[in-house]
Amino acid sequence: MKRTRMFLAGVYLLLPILLLVCPPAFSQTEKIENQYSAAKFKTYHNGNKIDSIYLMFSADMQAALPKDKANEFLGALKAQAGTIIAMEFKKYEGPYASYKTRFDRGTFAVNIALDAAHKINGFFVKPYEDESAVKPARTVTKLALPFKDEWTVFWGGDTKALNYHVEDPAQKNAFDMVITDKLGKSFKSTGTSNEHYYAFGKPLYAPCDAEVVDVIDGVADNKPGEMNKLDITGNTVVLKTANNEFLFFAHFKQNSIKVKKGMQVKAGTLLGLCGNSGHSSEPHLHFHVQNTDDLFSGTGIKAFFEDLRVNGTLKNDYSPIKNDKISPKK
């Protein structure tokens, strides 16, 4: 994958979006045919019956998504999201019946459109957004940088040119950070080993007092240039602040995480070591803040840091952008 797409994959890329023409629907009461199709889809998905799902597709849908592509598409959904626990009808969006769908590994909006014969002729999956949830614009908690060295912001900011994450609701304010040398390179030697990368193995710390609400460890680090397509975040720590802000740290080194779920940590507590696990092609830190603990249903919160140096200048209450070199105030 090209360097411009090297970091945490946006969940919109999990599945193709098929927008096929069908009549508009305005009722917000779930129709029996939609209820029946959603229930069958859940049963077939959980039972790994991809062929049965494919038979639910209309002829136009099958033409748009041939069987080999459908197998890949539906297999990726099962591998990445897991088993469906519950599907709750929420509303109609044009021709689509939209379901809040809780999977093993997150909550998504599953959208299904039916033709006149009650065959599926439109289907797409996207992160679920709770429209009633509080969506603060920026962090309230005072945050320190989560490291002690100088790091370079590879992705960060409010525009797509500065930050490819902006199109994902939960990760729209995310940062991807590396360590670079005077030539702007993030590695020494050939860059073919994780140990060649300056960020690999660097300690990462809690930026504030918080509760550890989720930990994933044991995921193998990738070889540079390769990515784990089935595990987006890799080894992960999620912290919850007293202000109900959820801090996501992704791609830790395998078996390096030092905290456990349920722990209360103080600012400066060692969380683990920077690695190259998950959907990552080189060692780096992915960090973002959102309003829920569910990566796939949250809304991003813009993170501001206290007492840091930015390109050699002292700043306070600052949100870094692409190419900034940042380090804690000494």
Image (tube, grey):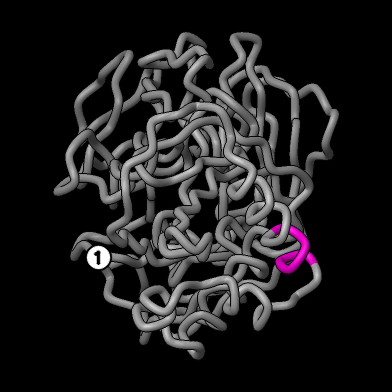
* Residue found 63% across the figure and 27% down from its top: 268
Spot the residue most to the left.
161
Judge whether residue 247 is colored magenta. Answer: no
Quadrant into which the C terminus falls: top left
Residue 84 pos. (x, y %): 74, 53
The answer to whether one can see residue 312 in this image is yes
Of 91 and 193, the residue lying toward us: 91
Residue type at the position of mark 1: Thr
Label 1 SS: helix
* Residue found 39% across the figure and 81% down from its top: 191
* Residue found 36% across the figure and 46% down from its top: 151
Q: In this view, does 77 lie above or below 214?
A: below
* Residue found 85% across the figure and 29% down from its top: 262
Residue at label 1? 4
Looking at the rendering, which quadrant does residue 253 occupy? bottom right
Taking the image as shown, residue 52 lies to the left or right of residue 12, namely right
Count of labels in the image: 1
Residue 190 pos. (x, y %): 36, 86
Of 292 and 304, the residue lying toward us: 292
The answer to whether one can see residue 285 in this image is no
Q: Main secondary structure of the magenta part?
A: helix
Residue 56 pos. (x, y %): 58, 71
Quadrant into which the N terminus falls: bottom left
Q: What stretch is highlighted in magenta?
A: 42-46
Looking at the rendering, which quadrant does residue 2 occupy? bottom left
Q: In this view, does 89 lie above or below 63?
A: above
Residue 38 pos. (x, y %): 65, 52
Taking the image as shown, residue 187 lies to the left or right of residue 48, namely left
Spot the residue most to the bottom.
68
